[in-house]
Amino acid sequence: MKKRIYIFIFLILNTTSILAETTEEKGLRIAMQSYENSRGYVDSQSDQLMILIDPKGNEVIREISGKTLENDDPNDGDKSIIFFNKPKDVEGTVMLSHTHVNDDDDQWLYLPALGRVKRISSSNKSGAFMGSEISFEDFSGLDYRKYDWKYLGEEEYEGEICFKLESYPKYKNSGYTKRVGLTDSHFRARKIDYYDRKGELLKTIHFEDYHLYLDRIWNADTFKVVNHQNNNSTIYKWINRELNVGLNKKDFEKSSLLKLSD
Amino acid sequence: MHKSYTTLLYILISLSVLTSSNHSFALEYKSYGYIQPELSYFLDGKGRHNQSKDKPSIFGQGTFITYVQDDAAKITVNVIGRYDDKDNNRTYFDLQKFKYEYFLDDATLSIGNDIIFWGVNESFHVVDIINQSNIAENIAGTKKLGQPMLTLSLYKEIGDINLYIMPYFRERIFPGSEGRPRYTAEINEDSVIYESSNEEKRIDLAIRFSKVVDDFDIGISHFRGNARDPELNVNQATLKLDPYYPILSQTGIDIQATKESWLYKLEALAGKIESENHVRAAGGFEYTFYGINDTSQDLGIVAEYLFDDRNSNPFNNETALAVRWTKNDINSTALLAGAYLDLRGDSNRFFCEYEKRLKDDVKLFMDASINGHINSNDFTYAFKDDSSLTIKVAKYF
């Protein structure tokens, strides 16, 4: 309800100022719309499959499953639990994250061999996730609050006219200096180019396999990541994704890691 | 006592599996494990007790987990075992976890064998007390034995409270006469003495309170029961060492502060054995340089210091320094190298642990443990000639 009022006020403010909109304001408006469209999922669970491909075409598979809890707090991030299944040597490991918008996340890892829960530093949001070309930072790339925005114009992508947006991370430990992306008329990100800390093109993520969930939320069920510097690529797939499943909020706390571990 | 307890638990678990299968005919479960051949090679030739200069063995671990009673309960079985070609004491099976858990909204009730870790440190585990160590596995005591217990965990607004009732004590497993490293004198495991008249059947109790407050993870704990770490007394008749388990009371605290790339850690306890009080504490920091040289590699530095106010305790003024390199590549290549230093200058030991995934389900581990200078009055003098290289290959299934 709060969110609706928020959008409503935003729209009123927006219609009055739309004529004098700067490229920064327009960029932010599109990014906000895109983010708002993805909200209201309450919670979700899914299996996730990663195919890591090296330049010679060798493939390895990673499998995890995840649960996410939406945070209603407009100043804070969502909570997530990841269960590691493959490679088999990490089976039974569980990671809990309380994400924050422009700060380090809070993260705990359950290590089954030691029966130990460890609080870990999350200053490496930009690090390679399980040896892939995707980083933790990329999973929350839709969150408009994490970036400054600029609208660059229109560009055609796969036969559709898209908004071209440039964004600059606000988070000081971000792995990127800039992103340039295309967002379609359904406010769905289709493709983003990522520039590294030196300002050089690092990688491109193509967001594909869009499905409509709860009759109104578009989620890309495949991320295709190509690293232009090391020529590795990663295909990241969501399988059996369900939203609004009625997960227990209390399971997203440190004490639950032992309880949920399997 | 231990047998009847295991039988009771077995019946309980079987019943809960049977009663829950009313709804579904096929029992859904998850199982995984690994088998790991190992070979150690000692650099100084034969040992001081004429032990062999190599040590082959096979280690295995299996885990089985299933949810029952409409997911309100969980059964976990985790068994480990080793066959050691040389040391009989290192050939064993242990039910690390063999437990039934029942979940309530704000609480969990658990019965059975479990492994419970308390603390935050990397090197010096001060407050950790629930499980007995199997030092035939390694002298550092990081491999534990499953502890039979009844546990009640309460998840409250003020924090989490765990209560542990431990009806049966597990004696420490020591290296045998062919074990390497081993103590100078042999340990007579048939001549164990307890302070408690109930001996191993004494009911040990523990409670722990834990809470996360922003960047701080805090735990406060109390334990009263048979000490896990026995005194070793020379038996004048046999000239062997007889383990003696006094009753220990200890109150501990463990805190970790997580500040961006810095982790600050502290564990401390006040303990009492036979009306003698003691204080033991260890703490330090860990700092990680993420993405060194614009690669995905990380480099971490760990430094910890250990203090004990008992001069009689062989580990009362030690430091551990280590560097951890994580390549974050497809093979999860990692290296940990460092040193344990006695700050009075009596002993130092260097270690290096390398690991890398060779295939999807095969992982390689290579460890080196090298003793530096050790004075003849130091506790670790007995292990002076036991510098070793170890190679382990784990096959996961």
Image (spheres, rainbow, N blue to C red):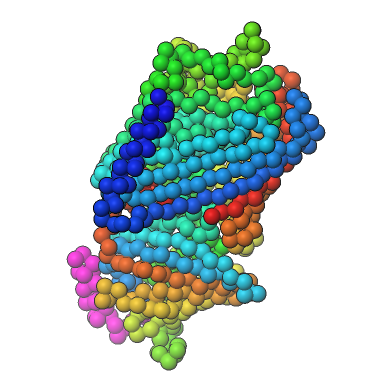
The secondary structure making up most of the magenta span is: helix
Observer-nearest of A72 and A47:
A47
| Residue at 48% across, 70% down | A236
Q: What x and y, as percent, mark residue A163? A: 40, 84
- As drawn, which residue projects farthest toward the top? B237
| Residue at 62% across, 60% down | B359
Observer-nearest of B148 and A101:
B148
Observer-nearest of B211 and B49:
B49
The vertical placement of A36 against B77, above or below, is: below
- As drawn, which residue projects farthest toward the right? B45
- Residue B328 figure quarter: bottom right
| Residue at 26% across, 55% down | B23
Q: What x and y, as percent, mark residue B22? A: 25, 53
Q: Which residues are magenta?
A: A1-30
Q: Is residue B270 left or right of residue B287?
A: left
The vertical placement of B183 against A94, above or below, is: above
The vertical placement of B331 against B48, above or below, is: below
Q: What x and y, as percent, mark residue B99? A: 38, 40
Whether residue B170 can be seen here: yes
The vertical placement of A135 against B313, above or below, is: below
Q: What x and y, as percent, mark residue B81? A: 55, 39
Q: Is residue B328 left or right of residue A236?
A: right
Number of marks in the image? 0
- Residue A9 figure quarter: bottom left
Q: Is residue B325 left or right of residue B45?
A: left
Observer-nearest of A246 and B302:
A246
| Residue at 46% across, 13% down | B195
